Image (cartoon, rainbow, N blue to C red):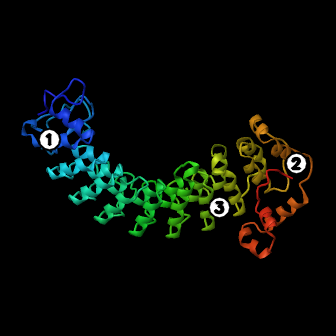
Amino acid sequence: TCSKNPLRGLGPKTAGSAQAYWQALLAADLGTVASLLSNPQSGLSPTLMFDTSNLEEVLDSPDVAGASSPTGLWSLNYEQELTTPLHITASRGYSACLHHLLLRGAAVDLAPGGRTALHTACLAASTDCVRMLLSFGADPEAVSEDGYKPLHLCQRLDSTCARLLLQHGAGVTSATEEQEDTALHVAARLGLEDHVKLFLSHGARLEAQNVEGQTQLNAACAQSHPPEAMGCYYGVCQQLVEAGAQVNTADSDRQRPLHHACRNANPQVVELLLARGANVNIMSYSGNTAMHNILQMAAYKLDHQPERVVRALLNHGAVRVWPGALLKVLRHCCASPRTIEALINSYDRVLSGHDVSPFSLQKYPNFYSSLFSLGRSPRSLQHLVRCALRNILEGRLLQALPELHLPGPLQHFLLLHFEDVLY
């Protein structure tokens, strides 16, 4: 039966051994923890369970000390959030206290809140605690209430915890129950290069798809990230591709890695995928090509250099924007003048008219002055020759370029090298 008198703890109105125990655990006060546990009068044990759903409520009962389950001890009018001394210390990296609790007989795989202490230690990247729990027999394959194994929770830069789990028998191909993510999906999505290298070396399956149909390469390309993380995601994608990941595998929305990489405006990843044969013009379920995706995001990803993505797509044969839509693109992308430059330089003529924000006009006066002047005069002969040559070599420009034996500056010009002016 449920307890009619829930016991107090953790709050300012409480006192007693459970309160002292809780505070000692939070403070990594090994002396107090040891003293309380060695005192039979305290009624405390290493497997005491605290209810943190309300910090005014905590288990402080001799009936609970040593119990493996809180069944029959709780009011049913609130959701229980249970933890143990082992979880508290493991999640904070308090290895000395954790060791003492384990020596005192703490149940290493107890999971009253849905996760074992090993889960919480991995999530916190508490390397010493992970090592200690495993040495005391913690199950590296334990499944949490939400369907995660410890390996799925290794989500920090340091890959030591993941390495320890694998050394103790964790399976690298296991998937989470709901999302069906493998550990490699998780690492790829978070841009964790060391983890990806580790999992690949242990036989992770490259083409495993999660519930959204994403492979690990799709997951890495689909994850939004700040400019400073672009190198990490490039490193992850490079490893996956070099290990044999397919660059044209579609997810359930028919989005390919290139669609995602363009939406997240990562030039290095886009160039990598294109170099490996990504289909530049294939559409997603919504009808978007990679070019659509980058143009939709260019104004919001200025620090990612979206112009490099647009240029790479054009140089690999992307279908150009319909000329009638250029004014709309100009209005939407005017904050990225180099994006406009790459697009305009893929045509031999420019439609008259403009729709540029006053802010962009003021910030980039020379560029937009040169753009507007094109409506009053023909393009330069040099540019017209470039357009003619690009049209002849469309779809095989990069393959044919070395055979032309052009000087470096002319190669750059042909490949739409940025000049910040139009002529």
Please state the horizontal and vertical placement of residue 122, each as a whole percent of the image: 33, 52
Label 2: element kind: helix
Please state the horizontal and vertical placement of residue 72, each as a whole percent of the image: 13, 36
Determine crowd level at label 1: few under 14, some 14-19, many 20+ residues with C-alpha closer than 10 A.
Answer: few
- The reply to whether the C-beta atoms of the residues labelled 1 and 2 are less than 8 Å apart is no
Along the line of sight, the residue nearer the viewer: 66 or 43: 43
Is residue 326 in sight in this rendering?
Answer: yes
> Residue at the front extreme?
31
> Residue at the right extreme?
377
Q: Which residue is mark 2?
A: 374
219 sits left or right of 362 in the view:
left
Label 3: element kind: loop
Cα gap from disc 1 to disc 2, whole angstroms = 84 Å
Is residue 251 in sight in this rendering?
Answer: no
Circle number at residue 342: none
Circle number at residue 280: 3
| Above-or-below relation of 135 to 113 | below
